[in-house]
Image (spheres, grey):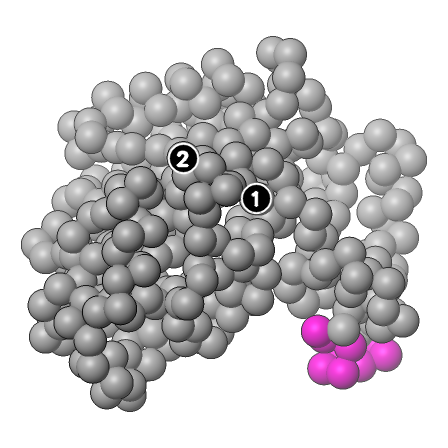
Amino acid sequence: MTDILTHTRPDAAGAWLVAALYHFARFDRYEQFREPLQAFCDANGIKGTLLLAREGINGTVAGSDAAIAALLAHLRAQPEFAALEHKESRASKMPFVRMKVKLKKEIVTMGVEDIDPMRIVGTYVDPKDWNALISDPDTIVIDTRNDYETAIGIFKGAVDPNTKTFREFPDWVRNNAGLHNKPKIAMYCTGGIRCEKATAFMKEEGFDEVYHLKGGILKYLEEVPAEESLWEGACFVFDERVSVEHGLKEGNHKLCHACRNPITAEEVTSPLYEEGVSCSHCYATRTEDDRERYRERQRQIALARKRGDRHIGG
């Protein structure tokens, strides 16, 4: 892999198509599937990340409409993924730099043994029914995402665990006895996959009425009109769009490439912000040597842009 990648346009007119997908299944041949899947994506100009594990597949990819349609057909042709569902959105620029197909122990890492969403899981709630559930005074609403995600958007009245990683979620649950104070637990995440494991874990911990938002925040923002919405802010996404809003329109957040935190237009005006080098979230935790290294990377990115190329660090 070279350090500079050419930024090509899709072969069809219009924006790039972004597909977020996951499917839990017994997938014993996941190791053998990696190289052919990588080759298929490369041949079709698809970029993004797909994770393969014995428990299934997870990831987000982008490409032309035809390329994404071909990939989804290819995946659903596999017996294990015949029922795979996905969510679509649009990006004005290719939101990924390269294509990576990775082998993992889990397709979403919780780090708790024997949590199996194929065996036990919470009750799915369609986006159209979500408002009624989370407005019920007998419901505790929990955001299962990490702190940098919740910082830019959250459902009204939701509990924010302030976790740094999903691995911290089980301990947070076990240390919060107050979660038993109401009969219903409603959980949500970006696309739904973290809630598959989170609700399975909650059921194993003895919570009876556990619900989760089918399709996650992305499906809610796609289907629920803004004037009826209980969502506040933007939804962080793991690509170069950084955030999306109602109707899955691209948000206005940027990403600090020093600490990977989303930053607002107001934070960009901070004297601590320097593109690719620092922001108000990370300035105090980086040394001047760190910042000088980031500045050199930023200079290389700028040179690549002038040549019409794309630097993988940008």
Q: For this view, does 10 lie left or right of residue 44?
A: right
Q: Residue at x 20, y 81 (%)?
A: 181
Whether residue 273 sits left or right of residue 251 in the image: it is right
Residue 47: x percent and y percent?
55, 33
Residue drawn where x is 47% and y is 76% of the image: 162
Whether 302 is drawn above or below 206: the answer is: above
Label at residue 245 = 1
Q: Residues within 10 Å of mark 1 (few under 14, many from 20)?
A: many
Q: What label sits on residue 223 in the rendered view?
A: 2
Q: In the image, what residue occupies the spot 20% across and 48% down?
A: 124
Give the percent coordinates (x, y) of residue 81: 22, 32
- Whether residue 226 sits left or right of residue 14 in the image: it is left
Residue 281 position within the rendered picture, expressed as x and y whole percent measured from the top left: 70, 73
The span shown in magenta is 281-289
In the rendered image, which quarter is residue 106 located in? bottom left
Separation of disc 2 and disc 1 at Cα? Answer: 12 Å
- Badge 1 marks a residue whose secondary structure is loop
Q: Disc 2 or 1, which lies upstream in sequence? A: 2
Kind of residue at badge 1: Glu
Left or right of 11: which side holds 38? left
Q: Disc 2 marks which amino acid?
A: Glu
Can you say which quadrant of the picture contains the N terminus? Answer: top right
